[in-house]
Amino acid sequence: MLNVSIIGGSGYTGLELLRILLNHPFVSIKRVTSRQFAGKQACDIFPSLPDETLFFENPSIEDIARDSELVFTCVPHKAAMEIVPQFYEKGLKVIDLSADFRLKIQNTYETWYGPHTAPSLLNQVVYGLTEIYREDIKTAKVIANPGCYPTSVLLPLIPLLKNKIISNENIIIDSKSGVSGAGRSLSLTSLYCEANESFMAYKVGEHRHTPEIEQELSIASEKEVIINFTPHLTPLTRGILSTIYCDLKIKNLDLSEFISDYYKESPFIRIRNNNILPNVSHVRGSNFCDISFKTDKRNGKLIIISCIDNLVKGASGQAVQNMNVMSGFDEKTALNIIPQYP
Amino acid sequence: MLNVSIIGGSGYTGLELLRILLNHPFVSIKRVTSRQFAGKQACDIFPSLPDETLFFENPSIEDIARDSELVFTCVPHKAAMEIVPQFYEKGLKVIDLSADFRLKIQNTYETWYGPHTAPSLLNQVVYGLTEIYREDIKTAKVIANPGCYPTSVLLPLIPLLKNKIISNENIIIDSKSGVSGAGRSLSLTSLYCEANESFMAYKVGEHRHTPEIEQELSIASEKEVIINFTPHLTPLTRGILSTIYCDLKIKNLDLSEFISDYYKESPFIRIRNNNILPNVSHVRGSNFCDISFKTDKRNGKLIIISCIDNLVKGASGQAVQNMNVMSGFDEKTALNIIPQYP
Amino acid sequence: MLNVSIIGGSGYTGLELLRILLNHPFVSIKRVTSRQFAGKQACDIFPSLPDETLFFENPSIEDIARDSELVFTCVPHKAAMEIVPQFYEKGLKVIDLSADFRLKIQNTYETWYGPHTAPSLLNQVVYGLTEIYREDIKTAKVIANPGCYPTSVLLPLIPLLKNKIISNENIIIDSKSGVSGAGRSLSLTSLYCEANESFMAYKVGEHRHTPEIEQELSIASEKEVIINFTPHLTPLTRGILSTIYCDLKIKNLDLSEFISDYYKESPFIRIRNNNILPNVSHVRGSNFCDISFKTDKRNGKLIIISCIDNLVKGASGQAVQNMNVMSGFDEKTALNIIPQYP
Amino acid sequence: MLNVSIIGGSGYTGLELLRILLNHPFVSIKRVTSRQFAGKQACDIFPSLPDETLFFENPSIEDIARDSELVFTCVPHKAAMEIVPQFYEKGLKVIDLSADFRLKIQNTYETWYGPHTAPSLLNQVVYGLTEIYREDIKTAKVIANPGCYPTSVLLPLIPLLKNKIISNENIIIDSKSGVSGAGRSLSLTSLYCEANESFMAYKVGEHRHTPEIEQELSIASEKEVIINFTPHLTPLTRGILSTIYCDLKIKNLDLSEFISDYYKESPFIRIRNNNILPNVSHVRGSNFCDISFKTDKRNGKLIIISCIDNLVKGASGQAVQNMNVMSGFDEKTALNIIPQYP
């Protein structure tokens, strides 16, 4: 059994880790930390949870390190950079769900997020987009688990850019997210009466997932890529759908076939033909990423549609997928969840 | 491996059976029938399904009987009474999700539903409320799987009536259901724009689940029980919550303790204290039934709140639970699904 | 022109008053106060508002009194009892939307809400259920605008109790409210991801609208009435639907006809026959209260269904209706809003 | 009083015309036709309607022509081309809400919709985008009321293209619509359980509003424009939001100021600064079109966001606006509806 702990377990990603890991046959959950709820039963805070033996705690780093081999850090950015190095130094494997270790260039991080206090760790970290970096993840000590928007965008784009199938210029990404992407903290825009029957764009051209997407697209295309990224808030709980517009360089290629082949060892990628376009409801609660390609015959633009459950493949599911790869478990362990429909 | 088939598999209960059974370690799905979609891949009709080897068929009863040991019949009432006897005669076990075999008295059935063409089978059938009739289910040949509203109502009420804790008069049941209770067929009231931002009562005092509830409450109290039952339609996809008002006969009893003890061998019953009232979101996608009791100190009324996922404990989950009991499997097999929250 | 001000205008009831009053031909809005947003344009805080000339202010009571003849106080209970007496003493008419002046007996108020600091005003106040107290409202100085749940419950029940048509015992009220009833303040249960796809009862037997309902039912029946009141939270923005169970004393009376006649001078009461049951979507955005009656033939119970838009007839609409009556305007002025459907 | 009739009044656009016109001081509704519901009271089919004197009828064209001066035709495309010419020949003014007369080139129509049986009328028709063609509308006999998506797209783009501020190449339009855009007819994708908690693109590069948008953009830019248009279905009842990506040709222009000036006589256009981005909830139930501009500093792309209520400015509201202009009424008559929020 792999002994794991969840640091900052009282948000939606913490709960989702619990939902998945409580059914994991090779994992033992040692500690779930929460400053706010320390001492309380997890199932009192999250009444969906059936397990009555689980309590939130507020232990020291030492206590956690003593009985855990791997930690999932689910704390906000800035807080993660304080604790991840401590776990790393104590020899624990870390899967960090915050943004703190996703950007490889300290400068880029600081432009978008402010000062970084643990830059020396940046080059130890593997970006945890499992399907792309699987080999590196196997031996990684610290994983920067990708952002939700980037996961939906990078999975279809990286294979195309790596193979020079599309231009690396003029890529436009129009993404739509459910409200759970904003987490469980109190804010006006997250209120039911504000988000219900509502639809809006936000942080147009300014969202912090922009440099993360650009970093990975630049690596794939071996050239600096500048994108347009516009996120939208849509009235549903779970799901991200990204509509991506780009220019084909190689025509007459069967893209569905190409990408199916590219991901043939990746059980969570499902390529859709044009009769069944991706829909967030088709992936709800699961680790799938559904992708489709459509070329607009009238002007040659390639339109890519991609969707995930932001809390699963966009966060906790991918984190467990990475843990499975790091630990030599079958990648699908505890993740063969059939989406709940309707 | 138990060989099972699903008859009428293209509705929401059929899909939900597939979601559960595809993860069942001791079951092999032989056939899934659908007149409408015969010949099509199940995952083309239900794109949430990952299994690409499953096809809808329209085989003869003989073909189904040849390779199946147990069938789930998910056809509408009236259609079920035509096919259930045929499977029964061929020696298959049947779990019928329609209303056709739930009422033991032919006359009562005909008052509410019209003519019954297979009345002779009625006394062979076991009412499949697992927690109450577990012993009978073990050896049953035909199960009448309970209705969704009755399941939510009977589980808390039967133990209280059996033990004369509440009066069998003046029981008022105010139930609220999500829209999936109406199935996947096209109707004006099921349209998004009609059901969204909408809340209404329907079939007040006339809903066909009334005699089903009354039959079981009468058995429990050994006296004829007449209830008031008012169902409501609420804008959510899954879930039923019933608020039940009744008169306590025995006071000063700790009802939570009593019922916890009554159901101590029933893993899907969760008794809630008053800090965490039942909420359909706490059981979503799972086979749990959450129950709480509250006595109104000002007038002595007992208010019972009970909720289930109508597609799981209210239909396909309970059907699998019954199959597990009939087949000697652990009752929780394939049903240890942690509710998906949020 | 009647000069009015809105005290505490930055919540949903304040916004709804603005939506209605900006179209009122005989009203001039002098001031809209908000501590939080003083100095800001109202249309920056509420971008739905087209009026660009309206600013939030934080003026003194004296300033408000100088240029206003009538104030709507939309502050929380406890805060209202501080300011309503000051406006009253300065000769302004007051329509108070809080709970502070709804209960006539100081003791009852204090049992449910805590200390009351302005009990001497209680006997000056008229309870603003327009259809019932229209004559008193015409000359009232201070109106206690009814709570949203009580409005939906009292309008159908008072005529029946006054005329001894139903028993005053064993009245059970099962109410369902949209999320806007909780206002615009930040709380976990008001978050989109918590309220969406969710349905629960809350404050069972303990809701503060209980004594308000009982006070008015007791007056109508000239006898103390004790009710059972169970509110529920339903995933929609606007609307309350109450299902009321009671015992008929006079049978063979056409209740729809009786009540249509009772309310024949009340343009906002719509009596529904049983083909079209009340639905919150039929009254959305309007001041209507839709009511239907159904007798359960099997056991003689009377089931009353009643619904309103909680922000209109349940709050700001009824406040304007009261202002119209107090000011000699046609009761429907600015309130002839056709419900927005779908 | 202007005598008007509504042809095909039992869908959502018919209902919305009734909601608006019943409050119009200068209009008398003579007939509302519906084959399906002829003989029924409108308020029995649409219980939101308070007017009890209105009945659906199925009169002859002659009967309608005898007592109406203007008709709104709300029938499906193909049906409209049969009846519009008949009303035109009888001297009635027609505002057609179908697609049949929007495309000026018969050939284009037939490519996207199939045979046109009344091509000779095409050059008599004025495209009813009020803000752009107001002068022509004043004297028009037949108005082709614009599609919902085109309205949201054309209002921001036409002024920019006319003034060569943006390039007419590489325009990408990513639109999101609520479910009411699909009307009130029964279809699987319009079911609550299918549309709720769902988000998908549809008809990618194939939607029939594409040629309508291109026609008007081509006229504005005096050059053929080919666009990319991807519509999406979002789980809300009302509203369309379009996110438009294009290339600036003239930089350093204050676009908000430019467009505010361009539309200074158009009361329904609201230009938003970047603190308050357009949101469908800010225009719900109203005839407003909210627009904002954002230049992505990192790559110079212009991102335009525009939103409307698809049933009002995208259909029935704009139809009434056109009627007002054709009839010499103030353009805002019956349309000064403040959006209902929340």
Image: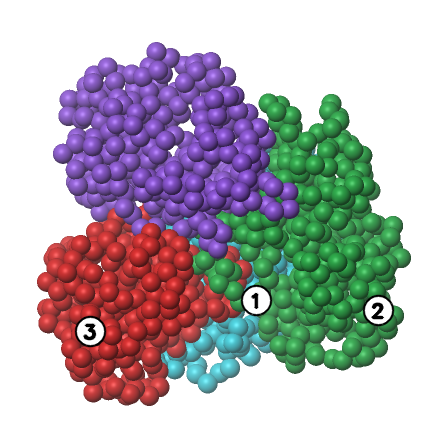
Chain colours: A cyan, B green, C purple, D red
Point out the residue furthest to the right here: B139
Q: Quadrant of residue A139?
A: bottom right
Q: Secondary structure at mark 2?
A: helix
Crowdedness near tag 2: few (<14), some (14–19) or many (≥20) residues, C-alpha within 10 Å: some
Point out the residue furthest to the front here: C252
User: Looking at the picture, how far across and down is residue A157, in whole percent?
Assistant: 47, 68
The three-letter code of the residue at mark 2 reads Tyr
Which residue does the image show at 36% across and 39% down from the upper left? C263
The residue labelled by disc 3 is: D66
The residue labelled by disc 2 is: B88
The one of D236 and C25 positioned closer to us in this rendering: C25
Crowdedness near tag 3: few (<14), some (14–19) or many (≥20) residues, C-alpha within 10 Å: few
Of labels 1 and 3, the one closer to you: 3
> Looking at the picture, does residue C134 appear above or below residue A235?
above
Which residue does the image show at 35% across and 75% down from the upper left? D76
Q: Is residue B175 visible?
A: no
Decide if residue C6 is on the left or right side of residue C210: left
Work out how far the residue at label 1 is from the one at label 3, CA to CA, in angstroms. Answer: 43 Å
User: Looking at the picture, how far across and down is residue D182, in whole percent?
Assistant: 41, 67
Work out how far the residue at label 2 is from the one at label 3, CA to CA, in angstroms. Answer: 68 Å
Q: Which mark is residue B185?
A: 1
Which residue does the image show at 55% across and 31% down from the upper left? C167
Q: Is residue A37 visible?
A: yes
Of labels 2 and 3, the one closer to you: 3
The one of A3 and D205 positioned closer to us in this rendering: D205
Which residue does the image show at 70% across and 36% down from the upper left? B169
The three-letter code of the residue at mark 1 reads Ser
User: Looking at the picture, how far across and down is residue A49, in whole percent?
Assistant: 66, 43
The three-letter code of the residue at mark 3 reads Arg
Work out how far the residue at label 2 is from the one at label 1, CA to CA, in angstroms. Answer: 28 Å
